[in-house]
Image: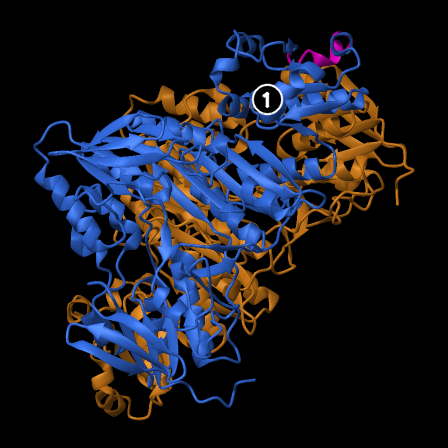
Chain colours: A orange, B blue
Amino acid sequence: MSAATTPPRRIVIVGGVAAGMSAAARARRLDEDAEIIVLERGEHVSFANCGLPYYVGGEIQDEAALLVQTPAKLRDALDLDVRVRHDVIALDPARRTVAVRGPQGEKQLRYDALILAPGAAAVRPPLPGLDSPRVSTLRTVEDAVRLRARIDAQASRPARRAVVLGAGFIGLEAAEALSRQGLEVDLVELAPHVLPPLEAEMAAPVTTELKRLGISVHAGVAAQAVEQHEGHDTLVLADGRRIEADLILLSVGVRPDTAVFETAGVACERGAILVDEHGRTNVPHVYAAGDAVLSADAVTGLRRPVALAGPANRAGRGIADHILRPASARPLPAPVGTAILRVGEITAALTGANADALRASGIHTDTLHLHPTQHAGYFPGATQMALVVHIRRGDGLLLGAQAVGREGVDKRIDVLATAIRAGLTAADLIDLDLAYSPVYGSAKDPVNLVGMVGANVTDGTLALWYAQDWERLRGETLVLDVRSAAEYAAGHLPGALHIPHTELRGRLDEVRAAAAGRPVRVLCGSGVRSHIAHRLLTQSGFDSASLSGGMLTARAVLGDEVLVA
Amino acid sequence: MSAATTPPRRIVIVGGVAAGMSAAARARRLDEDAEIIVLERGEHVSFANCGLPYYVGGEIQDEAALLVQTPAKLRDALDLDVRVRHDVIALDPARRTVAVRGPQGEKQLRYDALILAPGAAAVRPPLPGLDSPRVSTLRTVEDAVRLRARIDAQASRPARRAVVLGAGFIGLEAAEALSRQGLEVDLVELAPHVLPPLEAEMAAPVTTELKRLGISVHAGVAAQAVEQHEGHDTLVLADGRRIEADLILLSVGVRPDTAVFETAGVACERGAILVDEHGRTNVPHVYAAGDAVLSADAVTGLRRPVALAGPANRAGRGIADHILRPASARPLPAPVGTAILRVGEITAALTGANADALRASGIHTDTLHLHPTQHAGYFPGATQMALVVHIRRGDGLLLGAQAVGREGVDKRIDVLATAIRAGLTAADLIDLDLAYSPVYGSAKDPVNLVGMVGANVTDGTLALWYAQDWERLRGETLVLDVRSAAEYAAGHLPGALHIPHTELRGRLDEVRAAAAGRPVRVLCGSGVRSHIAHRLLTQSGFDSASLSGGMLTARAVLGDEVLVA
């Protein structure tokens, strides 16, 4: 119990954006008397980090819209002492002081509690020629303003070309923004596909949409050098390709901005500050939050940096609680890591762990692929989304989910993020009463369907096979295609036996003959009809399994090239 | 343990729409050998109940879209014996038979398990003249086809007039559909406001939107009689008003269609079948699901009918599980009762219990009103939604939520429905990692904000007052308006002292003088600034509270008439 502790008189906060400013505002609401000083290295506090690509792209017209707060407004409303262009250059934990360099010179500042929210800086890989003046990053309002000014200045020039290095969330937002401004855009990604946290089969429709927007996608290739020429640069790729660019945007990741604090004894791992469940570092009275800390993932328990605004805001707030009300402060939640992206007319989102993280953590999983429509199929405008969900083998605990589609993606990922946070299983999803009218959903919502499929897998009612295993399985098994004749004729896996699911009951002898003792691997369009067929087959004595996600997933995994008509 | 039980050989299902057909399909997937007979009184099975108003309104063009399945397709895919135009006229539990009247006459049908999913019929109140041929209901495909044919036949006639009796979900959908078809529509509701399950302050914007669509709303008034004239009817209201109508649509509720079964000894309450957590009635081997059953509400525990497609579908499925796998079947969930409605350009949705139900169940609650934007305010197109959330006093357990707005309403209600089902508290909502990019949400999502406000109320950081209490409080307290001068000048509560929240810290003496020992009741636009002011006041020794939902809620509760400029 800390009830007898005197509240700190001076709270010093390093960094005035998401985590830092949330901590400051909450601290004031809890303690009218504390002195609260926010030290921000940049020009602006509390700016709209996540809006920068949209300003570059022109959807957000006015720079002022990015500046959510100003020091003056924060002083008037919350009596905060916000000092921009103040850089913390040293920390002395023994004396409880930080050394600050500001426009008026250097000074020492004493603290009773110190919150480190310095954020992260763009990684600059050791690439020859990256010092070109045409190379920029997109982390601050200044970056965005500079980039937009350069675009506007060149607006009348034809054939302006941009290269975006790195196809993560911000890289993709930036690529679309530049494309929207009329530039020819090449997107280069070292990983095998864009948005590396997505499963490959989910990244495929994102790549398709990028190409539809006119963006050239180069995945699975390293950048080797930037050649600086008169008037433009040339990016050289490891495979020898050369891309000319009037502008190169670097978006290959961030590294925590923590050197000053690590030097002073704040424990870090890979440059990121280690904190406990209340945001405390190893140094007494020193807390940390935001892009500069490492957190233990809620699903896998593995430590990872989570550079997301939502968790940063909430951690800042929670740290203020712990400083001012230590006895009642709730622990900060482990991050689930939900993220979302609009790409052209589609949305890609994910929550929880992906297949790589689950493999790394040694958790045994089942993976479900579904393609439900965002609302009732009989209501105009229904479109399919692709859903992937990982559940724990044995009990069906929800571990992670991803969705890509035109509409309703954000809703389903938010529901699944809530379910993961609440520790629900697939079977629990069956029971969710989600808002249904044909305009908004289906009587069996996509999330309910995930629950039904997942519960069937967990209890053995449904056995799945995966398109990734097709090459290996095609010889060892009978692949049975139960789609309609028209669907089969339009393209099917070579060697697949075709019997429509409506005829299967009367044609089991054909299956038995063709299988010749081998297991049967059933497939249909998206997995609904093959599930019905699987149930029939398994109750008729076959070793059977249903293709997860059907041909929709198989085509994303294998490509259309494998199909025969 | 029922592991030794032989699975039933013949499952008879009464009613072939949501609950019944879900039970049939699941039963087949679990048991290839069972005989599964579905008896449907109407012409169609598995039709799109919830699509009927949209067919009437012309958004769904084709009648065929409403017919999701046909007996022939169900026979081919699932070997179901589906008999339409078969009415069950008696049940003999001792012999395990039902008497069925079909096109070929009457016969007895033996069952091993019987599932009652007869649905509910439209209530016809004892209103003189209601037998007019111009009065119709909207429960079946036949109803919808008849109504649409009548509208189409009269399409060239000017000044066609419709009255919709009952402003529940279906009444409102029907009213909009008729209005969309060019009819003048009057909507009559006995309850004080449209959509009676909504709180009054949430119904207000729905009424506004209905009026914007050109629909005349008459709430809080009873229909007294239908006068039948040559060529039209006149609906007479209890207050003497008379409304001429070429068409009257009756939508005042439904009653379970259970007389046959109650006569046979199936226990009912108010006509609805009582079931246990596996859907079992009091009669051995007889189950029931859907609109014809009473369920104990998940939040209040009070028994109520839940005429919703989602729970019906899932209950049918769960009953099939219990019949065929009694040892492992999960209990059916108590309904949370989530519902949603599009009205013109806005969405209204609710989940869990409302204030009336909570009062009736004796649960002590705190109620939160918020007006967050659906996505980041700095991104183009941000619009506010109204959110009301009820939490349990003391621990903040989530009990119910309602939302009305232009965008993002369905998502927040689904997240809150999930949270209610999972037994989360307001504080737990703070920790939800919801998908944020400025296109889709905010770093602090509306649901996170509900959590922050709710946790503040639960732990006493925030005290709320309510617009409903204004008349009583205005004399006993100092009402303090902390909005900007421009907002105050545009309209404020009479007698309110005005000090902008940015000046409050320096003007506490003025507050002290004006309060003269009375409590201070603060307000602002939506409750954000008044929360900051409340924290300042309460730490400065005032008895203070912040207006829940601010002036946005106050105007919905009190009307604009009370404002002075």
Residue furthest out toward the front: B128
Q: Where is residue A375? Give x, y as percent.
A: 33, 51
The subunit letter for the residue under badge 1 reads A
Q: How many marks?
A: 1
Residue furthest out toward the right: A4
Image quarter of the N terminus of chain A: top right
Q: Quadrant of residue B447?
A: top right
Q: Is residue A40 left or right of residue A552?
A: right
The amino acid beneath tag 1 is: Gln
Residue in view at x 47 percent, y 23 percent: A146
Q: Is residue A472 visible?
A: no
Residue in view at x 52 percent, y 11 percent: B491
Q: Is residue B162 above or below residue A390?
A: above
Q: Is residue A431 above or below residue B106?
A: above
Q: Quadrant of residue A490?
A: bottom left
**Is residue B174 in the magenta section?**
no
Relative depth, front residue between A529 and A17: A529
Q: Quadrant of residue A112?
A: top right
The range drawn in magenta is B500-510
Q: Where is residue B104? Give x, y as percent.
A: 15, 76
Q: Which element type, helix, strand or loop, lies under badge 1? A: loop
Q: Is residue B384 left or right of residue A553?
A: right
Image quarter of the C terminus of chain A: bottom left
Q: Residues within 10 Å of mark 1 (few under 14, many from 20)?
A: some
Q: Which residue is mark 1?
A: A69
Q: Where is residue A451? Give x, y as percent.
A: 46, 64
Q: Is residue A212 left or right of residue B399?
A: left
Q: Is residue A116 visible?
A: yes
